[in-house]
Amino acid sequence: MSNLTDQQKGSLMAFVAVMFITPDSLFIRLSNIDTWGLVFYRGLIPFITVFIGMLLIYRLNFFKLLFTSGYHGIIYIVTFSITNITFVVSIQNTNVANTLLMIATAPMLSAILSAFFLKEPPDKKTLISIIVTFLSVIYIFFDSLKVGNFYGDILGFITALGLAIGAVTIRSAKSKNLVPAAVVGKLLVATFAIIFVESFVLLKKDIIIVPLMCILCVAIPFVLVTIAPRFIPAAEVNLFFLLETIIGPIWVWLVIKEQPSIETLQGGVIIITTIAIHSFLKLKKS
């Protein structure tokens, strides 16, 4: 890693993280545990896993890193906790494709937030992409109103907003390590979920699916996604989530045959095409 440029480091971390995340939606669908039980384990298991790893690497410096993260750490703990909850509840209340398409708007949301808070105003191409993307989201929302998926879609959009805020927060605090804040966020998720959990018992295939999901699709990616924006722009990190938007629904379709609506497919094609073209033009310019 020491021989790589910042661009290469950030891009590699973001790519690996998203590839681990792609089967996450499928695992959520395959699990039989209640929603809040799933949220609890997705908080507790990654917390224990990463906390032990951080203590082995940083020892007591872990707490120093946590307390010196300041208000950036607090913001990240809050947004990280919220997105971890809204993502699971969204998947449980709408099509997987809808949730992931909402999350695909995170790069554009990052661009808007960066303009306000980091004084990095979007160029004309980005503004056009933002407008097209949000018109497509509104189109999908109207379809969801008809079929009763609106609640899940709204939570998916809140997840995207949380991801954008988190990425911009990390970008604005490049000198700080916010992984300890993310660890605390996981503990907060588990603590909050305890209030609503109906049963903590894992039965049959959940004994394998839940721990596997929590380590491969949650623990490893959240460390990489937390570090990546220190090396590349927040919007660029979120662009890698386009891979999840494409691959995630394919996993679900192949295994459990869940098909998105025509309106979701139409809106999704426009969103993905718009962001892909925008990314290509930005890379070509750089």
Image (spheres, grey):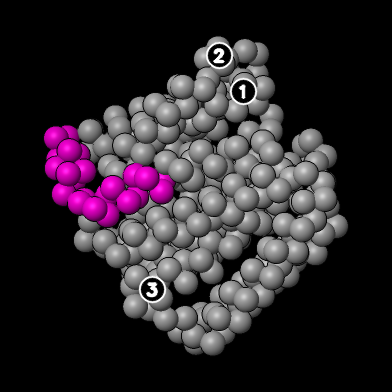
Q: Which residue type does callout 3 highlight?
A: Phe
Query: Which residue shows up at 54% across the image and 42% down it?
Result: 86
Query: Mark 2: which amino acid?
Result: Ser
Q: Which amino acid type is marked by label 1?
A: Asp
Residue at point 60%, 37% (across, down) = 89
Measure the alpha-carbon separation of dots 1 and 2. Answer: 8 Å
Q: Residues within 10 Å of mark 2 (few under 14, many from 20)?
A: few
Would you say residue 36 sits in the magenta stretch? no
> Residue at label 1?
34
Instruction: Report whether 202 appears left or right of 10.
Output: right
Query: Which element carries disc 3, helix, strand or loop?
Result: helix
Looking at the image, which is closer to me, 214 or 123? 123
Whether 41 is drawn above or below 147: the answer is: above
Mark 1 vs 2: CB contact within 8 A: yes
Q: Is residue 147 shown to the viewer in this render?
A: yes
Closer to the chain start, of discs 1 and 2, is: 1
Percent across and percent down for residue 234 are 42, 65
Pointer 3: what residue? 116
- Compared to residue 73, the image places residue 196 above or below, namely above
The magenta-colored residue range is: 58-80
Q: Which mark is residue 199?
A: 2
